[in-house]
Image (cartoon, rainbow, N blue to C red):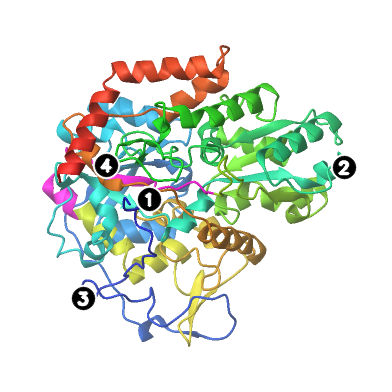
Amino acid sequence: MGRRKRQTKRTFVWGTGRKGTVRSLFGAAALMLLTGGCSSQGDRETDTPPRYEEHMDISVAYWQIDEFLKNREEDEVLQKLEEEFNITIVPRNITWDDHYTKLQLWAETGDLPDLFAGDFRFGSSYYQWAREGLLHEIPSDLSSFPNLEIYLDNPETEYCKVDDKVYCIFRQTYSEQAETVKDRTIAYRWDLAQKAGITKEPENWQEFREMILAIIEADSEGTGISGMTAKDYNMIMGPLFTYSIPLASNGGTNFYWVPQERDAEGTASDRYVPAIFAGKELGSDALATWQLIRDMYQEGVIEQDIFLATTAQAEEKFLMGRSAAICFDGGVSNTKTYENIIQYWKEIHGSEFLEDVRFLDLMPSVDGETYYTVWDYAWSESYISAAVSDEKLERILAIYDYLLSEEGMLLSHFGLEGESYCVEEDGSIRLLGEEAPSDRYLSIGMLASLVSWNNGIQDGAKYPSTVPEAYRKVDEERVERARQCGIPEYDYEYTAAVHQMDDPFSIDANAIFQEIMLGKEPVEEVWKAIIGEYKKQGLMEVIEEVNRRVQQS
């Protein structure tokens, strides 16, 4: 049986200390929202960064960075960071809707910012940029940056390499495979379903389709409600692909490889293929999923303009009752979901969000099993331009090291001690005032996740959170459900073999999904034509070469 990718839970190491030693973020102290007196800052050790004599401007591209840096004069967190490192952060604004095209353009024109975030490492651009000398290699010797060294002492770093060199810093999202179930969540209007005569929540895709169509037909709120929307159209691929190709959602160069077929006894063949092309006949396993997707789009279960909606528009449509369902990322307790949708729900609808909305359970596959979408643990990365000087590289790495330290962690998440939070006698954190730290210090919206998305702060049982416990509980239940599900057999060595090729083969799952959904010809014909195009691009040669490399290794 082929090995599966990183199934065990991983624990981060925070603060300074011996490499490989696992410690909690703040020793034995749990960060909780408590009351009581606070200890003084002098009672604790701090990781004060060194002073730098030469001032530097560091250009940074990050989603909505203009918004996060717009009140420099009042943002004491930003001021503290810039003063400590003698820098000025120069914003290069990108959004969730244009970041990919902007960064591609800047790369083509030689205008990449000094530091930028994006999701490129599993696409051909990453290999191209690294080999063309556009990205700065991350030094192998990080002993001068102990927190960063510990952070990168992680299996994820292997998937940041091009020709055995690291050219990006992964931004950790999840700590175990089951947590990736949160990456795609479908919420639907259960209150409207009941008004439309639906008496039980859907347990398969057919029942989900019937429910959404009933909501649309009843239109009980008179909003002209439509079907399911999504923050990005490709988000719905994950849940839908589990119908017959559960490992096919990853595209780019990071697609999973699976046995092409199984015999009547369930024995897997020795030949591995990209999951999207699995089946006795190349690609035949996908046909059931493609037909489901086409049917859901044509009948209106998936809204007709899903390819046109921006993230903000999709959130607004669901909030205002113009979409019967929405697919979003980050889980129910995602801060952005709470801030953009949930917190306004009662004001608009007069009832609590969890009274009106339910979350689609994992749906059974055509084989009768239940799967969840398997994602990588880190969906995006930080990059440093090759154009930066050695001195600026050192400064950037020092900033990253600081943000991974205890002091930097507290600053970038909770603000200034004594102003927006205090440390209790038992070491726990208590927030001060009615205003959230991220509202008081806007730069926190960027600094808290510049290095890593998931660093323990998301554990609501330990840390202050603006998202109520009830929403975190929903996510915990979904993760536990995922832990009970099996993961189909796959072997990451085949994916690694693709990465080692001089010109890594890429699969554009988004384009395939869109072409199938919008196609007018029968699904079988459209899919056959798509497979033919990939064969022209060398698919069969890649399959043979990758199988040869792995089997001879």
Badge 2 vs badge 3, beta-carbon distance below 8 Å: no
- Which of the two residues, 205 or 343, is positioned nearer the viewer here? 205
Mark closer to the chain start, 1 or 4: 1
Tell me if 170 is positioned left or right of 166 in this view.
right
Q: CA distance from mark 4 to mark 3?
A: 34 Å
User: Is residue 399 magenta-colored?
Assistant: no
Residue type, label 2 = Lys
Residue denoted by label 1: 378
Range drawn in magenta:
371-394
Residue denoted by label 4: 494
Q: Which mark is residue 20?
A: none
Relative to 132, residue 429 above or below: below
Mark closer to the chain start, 1 or 2: 2
Image spot of residue 342 (x, y percent): 68, 51
Q: CA distance from mark 1 to mark 2?
A: 40 Å
Residue 168 visible somewhere in the drawing: no
User: Is residue 378 magenta-colored?
Assistant: yes
Q: CA distance from mark 4 to mark 2?
A: 50 Å
Residue denoted by label 3: 18
- Kindly report which numbered mark, 4 or 2, lies closer to the viewer in this rendering: 4
Q: Residue furthest top?
A: 521
Mark closer to the chain start, 4 or 3: 3
- Kindly report which numbered mark, 2 or 3, lies closer to the viewer in this rendering: 2
**Label 2 element class:** helix
Image spot of residue 317 (x, y percent): 69, 35
Tell me if 478 is positioned left or right of 416 in this view.
right
Q: Residue at x 48, y 87 (%)?
A: 425
